[in-house]
Image (tube, rainbow, N blue to C red):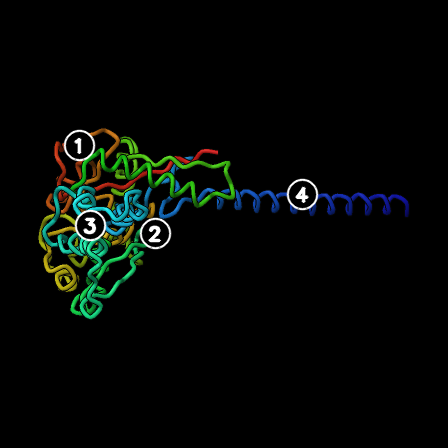
Amino acid sequence: MIYYYLAVMMKYYQLLLLTCLTMACTAGYAQAKKEKNKEILVYQCLRYNDSVHVKQTEVSIAHWLAYVYAKFEDHPDGDPDPGEVAKFLPDSVEQSNQFLFDMFLRYWKIIVTNELDEEQYEKFVWNSQSVRSFPLYLTKEEKKEYDHIKTFLNKPITGLTFEAIEEFMIWQSEVLDGWRKEDENYTHEVRFLPRLIYDDLIESTKTGLRNSKEKDGTLSVVGDSVNLKGCHLYNYKGSQSCPMSEGRFKEYGTLTSTVAVDSYNPDIDGYYNLLGNVAEMTATKGIAKGGHWGMYASEILKNEDLKYSTPSSKIGFRFMVVVRK
């Protein structure tokens, strides 16, 4: 009888050991899987599927200026003419943003003429919402507006041609590849989002708005565009009579314009401004999605294709990154 109990106990401990080993292996696998997922995360992007990552925000003015600066920083023929640099700036500019591009061109004029008045200008290096830093020269008065300038640099870049953005995407791909030099098994291809992906993401955004609830379980969104306090949930045309209006006017000087790319709350998937702010170019040239600040919410929510033929101050872009191993 004692041998029987010994056998049972041996069987029990073997099973216990096997269970512990299995759990350890599973935990190890989960950790390895987690690390693998961590490896292919893409800067400023959210995972859409195993290989596609989508930019969390629209591309900002700062991001675009960083690209232009990088393009001319090591100019093969010496310091570039400011006129050449200007060709890479938007064709159509929202008037309130013009001062940023004037500041940027000022940097190149000072370099070419080598006439820096150190009592008048001071060099500032910016890196907000950009993949690399770039310089601006500011006067003493402009330095006092540091936070204001930073906010405007964080607004979406608009007024560009489809072809100019394609060139940007080649550069962005090279930048992302360069960050992974230690692992040459991965490549990054930056592209416009297809209309179908926009439709999927926008529908998810709208579903999230319809199902948004307060702590007591009541719906917190009215008509997919306004919260219970009467405030807009994204940037569209209409009444701005809510507690946030005063702050927005103080920040931007108007209630009818673009706002920073990370303004308003992100949607249910974590993306900012898929609805409103600026319409976004798709992979189909001449078609934009998501609507813009000059459209009513009812128009935006229809999610109809917005056609364009020339650069517009109401049309910007975000991108997706295809990661290949």
| Identity of the residue drawn at 29% across and 60% down | 125
Q: Quick one: label 3 or label 1, which is nearer the N terminus? A: 3
Say whether marks 2 and 3 touch (CB < 8 Å): no
Secondary element under disc 2, as helix, strand or loop, is: loop
- Using the rendered view, name the quadrant where residue 298 is placed: top left
Q: Earlier in the sequence, mark 4 or mark 3?
A: 4
Task: Kindly identify which numbered label has been placed on residue 22.
Answer: 4
Give the spatial CA distance, label 3 vs label 1.
Answer: 19 Å
Which amino acid type corresponds to the residue marked 1 in the rendered image?
Asp
* Image position, residue 37 (x, y; %): 49, 43
Q: Nearer the viewer, mark 2 or mark 1?
A: 2
Which of the two discs, 2 and 1, labels the residue nearer the N terminus?
2
Mark 3: amino acid: Tyr
Q: Earlier in the sequence, mark 2 or mark 4?
A: 4
Q: Nearer the viewer, mark 2 or mark 3?
A: 2
Q: Residue at x 26, y 39 (%)?
A: 202
Report the quarter where the N terminus lies. top right
Res 163 visible? yes
Residue position for label 2: 132
Q: Position of residue 53 (x, y in %)?
A: 38, 40
The answer to whether residue 243 is left or right of residue 325 is: left
Q: Is residue 28 left or right of residue 146?
A: right
Residue 116, which numbered label? none
Looking at the rendered structure, the kind of residue marked 4 is: Thr
Q: CA separation, marks 4 and 1?
A: 53 Å
Disc 1 target residue: 305
Residue 321 at what x, y percent from top left?
A: 36, 38
Q: Residue at x 32, y 34 (%)?
A: 191
